[in-house]
Amino acid sequence: MSVGADALPSPARKGNAARNAAIVVGVVLVALIAVLATRGSFESPSSKKIGQVAPELTGESLDGQPFSLAQHRGQWVMVNFFATWCAPCRVEHPQLVEYARQHPDDVQIVSIAFDDQADNIREFFAREGGDWPVLAEGTGRTALDYGITGVPETYVVAPSGLIVARVADGFTVAKADAIIESLGGYDLGTGAGA
C-alpha cells in the first residue's frame, strides 16, 4: 500500500500548527500575568475584620423586639449569618442550640438571616429550636459590613466589642469554647473581653 503525497503533512501545515500553538501559549501567559497582577491580596474581606470593632448591628428581631449589638457590650456575642435554604446552616444549627443551652448567661447569640423569608425563618426556628434574636429585614448591608463570603459564617465578638474570630467551616460548641477559652475564658474580666 502506498501513501499519497497529500497524506503527509506539508511543511506549511507544520508551520501553521507551530504558529498556532505559540499563539495559544502566548495568550495563556498574558491572561495568567493579568490575573496575577490584578488579584491583589488573597485574604478574604471577612478575615480583615478580625481585631476590628464589630460593625454596628441594629434591627428588629422576628419577635418584634429591638436588637442592638451595642447593648451587649461587656458580653460575648456570636453573630451568626445563616439561611434556612443553606444545607450547612441546617447542619450547624443544632450546635448553636446546644451552645445557647450550655451558656445561657455567658454569651448572646444573634442570627442574621441572609436572603431568606421571615415566614421560613419562623418555621425553621419553631421546628429546630433556638430562642435568640433573629434579624431578617435589611440584612444585606449588614452582610457587606461584616464582609461575609457565604453562609454559614459566625463572628465571635468579645466583650470589648472587637471581632476576635470567624468560624466559616461549621460552628460547633467545641470550636466556640476553644476560641473563647484561648482568649481568657468566659470570665468577662480576662483575655480579649477585658
Image: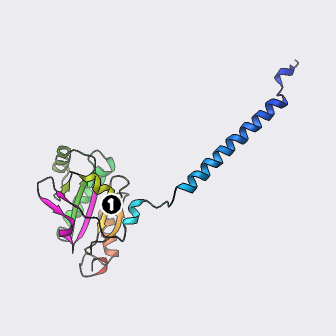
Residue 40, above or below 104 = above
Q: Is residue 24 magenta?
A: no
Give residue 107's position: percent from left, percent from top. 22, 68
Give the crowd class for mark 1: few <14, some 14-19, many >=20 residues within 10 Å. many
**In what element is the residue under mark 1?**
helix
**Quarter of the image containing the C terminus?**
bottom left
Give residue 104's position: percent from left, percent from top. 17, 67
| Residue at 43 percent of width and 59 percent of height | 44
Among the 4 quarters of the image, the one containing residue 100:
bottom left
166 or 140, which is in the foreground? Answer: 140
**Quarter of the image containing the N terminus?**
top right
Outermost top residue: 1
Q: Which residue is mark 1?
A: 146
> What range of the chain is rendered magenta?
52-80
Outermost left residue: 64
Give residue 57's position: percent from left, percent from top. 23, 62
Among the 4 quarters of the image, the one containing residue 45:
bottom left
Give residue 39's position: percent from left, percent from top. 52, 55
